[in-house]
């Protein structure tokens, strides 16, 4: 009667497969844009990517007025960003909609 030892054999096979698989494929950077109300919009990057280089424009993509005041903050542990424009003294009224564009990188 022969005994089979599967545990060590399976472990060796798994290790060889892992070595042969090589490094994981690099994740390409993406750009995410969310359009919404000037009272708040969120842009969330795909799983595994982090938000960086966020900027706000009018909803149609044109630049905001030079004296328009806005605020951007990170959300979801850095996976996304949120932006809003509130009416401030001395600032033009918020546009009808805003666009938040975020670069998503590893």
Image (cartoon, rainbow, N blue to C red):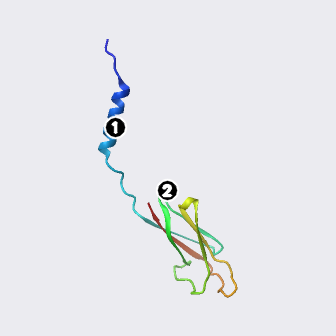
Q: Which mark is residue 15?
A: 1
Tell me if residue 97 comes above or below residue 51 in the rendering. Answer: below
Closer mark to the observer between disc 1 and disc 2: 1
User: Residue sitting at 58 percent across and 76 percent down?
Assistant: 98
Viewer-proximal residue, 67 or 41?
67
Residue in front for this viewpoint, 64 or 77:
77
On screen, 14 above or below 95? Answer: above
**On the rendered structure, is 97 left or right of 52?**
right
- Looking at the image, do the residues carrying marks 1 and 2 touch, with CB atoms under 8 Å apart? no
SS category of the residue bearing label 2? loop
Picture quarter with the C terminus: bottom left
Please provide percent x and percent y for residue 93: 66, 84
Task: Tell me if 33 is positioned left or right of 29 in this view.
Answer: right
Task: Mark 1: give few (<14), some (14-19) or many (20+) Cα within 10 Å.
Answer: few
Residue 3 is drawn in which quadrant?
top left
Drawn side of residue 14 relative to residue 30, left or right:
left
Q: Position of residue 65 (x, y in %)?
A: 57, 86
Instruction: Pick whichever of labels 1 and 2 is earlier in the sequence.
Output: 1
Residue 33 on image: x %, y %? 51, 70
Vertical position of residue 25 compared to residue 14: above or below: below
The residue pinned by badge 2 equals: 47
Who's the residue at 34% across and 20% down the image?
Answer: 4
Query: What is the number of the mark on residue 92?
Result: none
In the current view of this chain or complex, which residue is farthest to the top?
1
Image location (x, y in percent) of residue 8: 35, 28
How far apart, in angstroms, are the residues tagged by discs 1 and 2? 27 Å
Location of residue 71 (image quadrant): bottom right
What is the quadrant of residue 91 in the picture? bottom right
């Amino acid at each position: 009667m022969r005994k089979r030892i599967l545990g060590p054999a399976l472990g060796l096979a798994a290790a060889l497969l892992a070595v042969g698989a090589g490094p994981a494929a690099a994740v390409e950077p993406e750009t995410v844009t969310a359009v919404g109300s000037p009272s708040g919009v969120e842009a969330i990057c795909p799983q595994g990517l982090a938000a960086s280089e966020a900027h706000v424009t009018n909803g149609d993509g044109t630049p905001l007025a030079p004296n328009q005041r806005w605020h951007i903050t990170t959300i979801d542990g850095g996976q996304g960003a949120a932006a809003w424009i509130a009416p401030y003294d001395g600032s033009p009224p918020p546009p009808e909609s805003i666009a938040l564009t975020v670069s998503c990188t590893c």
